[in-house]
Amino acid sequence: MQETPHTQKVSQYYDRNTRLFNMFGKTGGTRNIHASLWGPGVTSSKEASNYSNTLILDLIERPILPRTRVLDLGCGTGASLAYIQENTRLDLDLVGVTLSQRQAIFAAEHLSKLHPDITVYAADYHHLPHSWNANFDLAFAIESFVHSPHPELFLEATFNVLQPGGLLVLIDTFPSTAASSDHFIFKQDVSDYQQFWNAGQILDPDALGQLASSYGFLMTINDDLTAWVEKDRVRDRWIAQFNRRFHRLTTFHPYLHALRGGNAVQAGFRNGWLTYRKIVLEKPLES
């Protein structure tokens, strides 16, 4: 795995925080480390936590062209892959990569008991093995693309490992194309988003589409899911108060870093400069 200062920072972020995310995150016991979405028909915290996974599963199980070889780019502890395997009608080949050695070890230990057919590697999604080229029908990244400091390398590597006709699905925070302000609070929120949410780049959907097209992808879906994101919880209000009153203390512990970054994301949703989206990029059949 080839590390850069930023990818090392992201790896350490998840090495240090994953246990606490699972302990204090409101995931309904799912071990998902991503936003809860209260989409149509969702009635429980567990369903909200898994809603992103259901969006991926729907694309895998498309009746006309099901996709059986699936790669999770930034798989964490393998919760999304486990959900997909437990709920699919297909015989799938499921593989995940994570920067975090600790997450990879935890995933291997947990999945070996219930899902031994799922494979998780500690690897950098910017540098995927050449032996994987044209080997996957669908790749997805839930809240991991945001960490990429080199989206061009991410897109190139993913394009290479997909079969012609394959899909890359991104579910993540994206800045609004209208986001622009010189106001101090806005600039502080953007700074916190980049530093404490470990955002490697700030590409809005239009810029992403242009960059992706330069690598051969076609953007076929760009859905705004922001309205479904669980926001303004009591927990979020307490974090916002803590951040305002004890701003400097949030730099002293990795988990407090994460809370400060999460507060910036909530501010971004509230003030309209961040959106939460599902974006699907397709590798043309002719490539």
Image: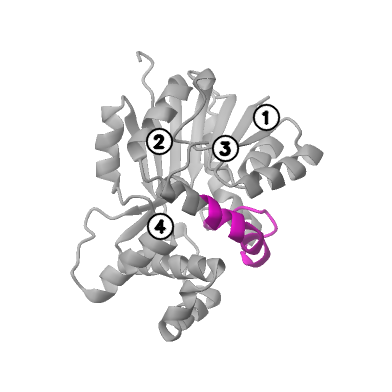
- CB atoms at circles 1 and 3 under 8 Å apart? no
Relative to 229, say whether 111 is above or below.
Answer: above
User: Where is mark 2, residue-wise?
Assistant: 154
Quarter-of-image position of residue 275: bottom left
User: Where is mark 4, residue-wise?
Assistant: 226
Closer to the eye: label 1 or 3: 3
User: Where is mark 3, residue-wise?
Assistant: 97
Quarter-of-image position of residue 182: bottom left
Secondary-structure class at tag 4: helix
Q: Earlier in the sequence, mark 3 or mark 2?
A: 3
Q: Earlier in the sequence, mark 4 or mark 3?
A: 3
x, y percent for residue 78 = 64, 43
Frontmost residue, 47 versus 34: 34
Closer to the eye: label 2 or 1: 2
Q: Which residues are magenta?
A: 11-37
Circle 4: residue type = Thr
- From mark 1 to mark 3, how far is it between C-alphas? 23 Å
Could you tell me if residue 262 is visible in this image?
A: yes
x, y percent for residue 60 = 55, 31
Q: Earlier in the sequence, mark 4 or mark 2?
A: 2
x, y percent for residue 161 = 47, 23
Instruction: Give me the residue at 42% from left, 53% from top.
Output: 225
